[in-house]
Image (spheres, rainbow, N blue to C red):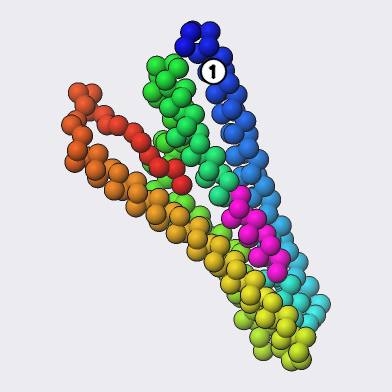
């Protein structure tokens, strides 16, 4: 490949990386907005029921709303993870090959190496905000369930909660598997690879 071709390929890779980073930022902002919408809805329903003495069964709206928003959040997290993997595992080696600078585009690797248990804590927090609120709403409304319509609405809320719990459990499972893969990879490299003269080591992290 000529220098001109390398330059064009590098320019295309950088443009691709910029577009992916913009996508990650957009999806992260979208997630923050969804969290805000869910908390606002919870506060509005709770405030109306408590201050206006409205029927407690209004809380049955929350499992449906929280599930819809929570599933969207899980989907956005998955897209962000895939985009980060593409940046770290595909574009970073390509750009390093064209520039002979292996440390370029190392932010994803640097970040994920130092995040430690932050992603699990984040998933647990989101689990409280979405499935947790749904479960609490179902528990609070259970004593007020009377007729067939009430039972049907409660059952729909319970099914929605189970769907949301399944999605969040899958998200946590992905994190655990990725952390285990990183742990095994680090242990294998420490065992198999000789120390470099500068005291460093190879870097092939797995982005979750």
Whether 66 is drawn above or below 119: the answer is below
Instruction: Write the residue at 72% across / 61% down.
Output: 40
Q: Please say whether residue 168 is one of the residues in the magenta stretch.
A: no
> Residue 60 lies in what quarter of the image?
bottom right
> Residue 83 lies in what quarter of the image?
top right
Tell me if 182 is positioned left or right of 40 in this view.
left
For mark 1, give the secondary structure: helix
Instruction: Write the residue at 74% across / 92% down.
Output: 146
Of residues 50 and 81, the one drawn nearer to the viewer in this rendering? 81
Residue 165 position within the rendered picture, expressed as x and y whole percent measured from the top left = 55, 68
Residue 176 position within the rendered picture, expressed as x and y whole percent measured from the top left = 40, 56
Residue 74 visible in the displayed image: yes
Which residue is farthest bottom?
Answer: 146
Whether 8 is drawn above or below 85: the answer is above
Mark 1 neighbour density, 10 Å: few (under 14) some (14–19) many (20 or more):
some
Whether 29 is drawn above or below 153: the answer is above
Instruction: Write the residue at 43% across / 27% down.
Output: 93
Residue stretch in magenta: 64-76
Residue 192 position within the rendered picture, expressed as x and y whole percent measured from the top left = 19, 38
Which residue is farthest front?
Answer: 1
Whether 125 is drawn above or below 2: the answer is below
Instruction: Report the number of discs.
Output: 1
- Report which residue position mark 1 lands on: 9
Tell me if 110 is positioned left or right of 139 in this view.
left
Prevailing secondary structure of the magenta residues: helix
Residue 107 visible in the displayed image: no
Of residues 156 and 112, the one drawn nearer to the viewer in this rendering? 156
């Amino acid at each position: 490949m000529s220098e001109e071709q390398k330059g064009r390929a590098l320019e295309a890779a950088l443009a691709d990386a910029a577009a992916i980073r913009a996508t990650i930022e957009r999806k992260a902002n979208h997630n923050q907005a969804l969290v805000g919408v869910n908390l606002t809805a919870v506060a509005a329903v709770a405030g109306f029921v408590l201050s206006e003495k409205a029927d407690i069964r209004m809380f049955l709206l929350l499992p449906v709303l929280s599930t819809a928003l929570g599933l969207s959040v899980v989907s956005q997290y998955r897209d962000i993870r895939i985009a980060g993997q593409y940046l770290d595992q595909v574009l970073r080696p390509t750009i390093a090959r064209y520039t002979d600078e292996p440390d370029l585009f190392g932010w994803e690797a640097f970040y994920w190496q130092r995040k430690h248990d932050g992603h699990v804590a984040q998933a647990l927090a989101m689990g409280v905000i979405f499935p947790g609120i749904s479960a609490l709403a179902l528990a609070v409304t259970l004593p007020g369930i009377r007729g067939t319509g009430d039972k049907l609405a409660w059952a729909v809320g319970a099914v929605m909660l189970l769907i949301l719990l399944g999605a969040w459990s899958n998200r946590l499972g992905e994190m655990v598997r990725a952390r285990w893969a990183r742990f095994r990879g680090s242990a294998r490299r420490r065992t198999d690879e000789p120390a470099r003269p500068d005291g460093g080591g190879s870097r092939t992290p797995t982005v979750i």
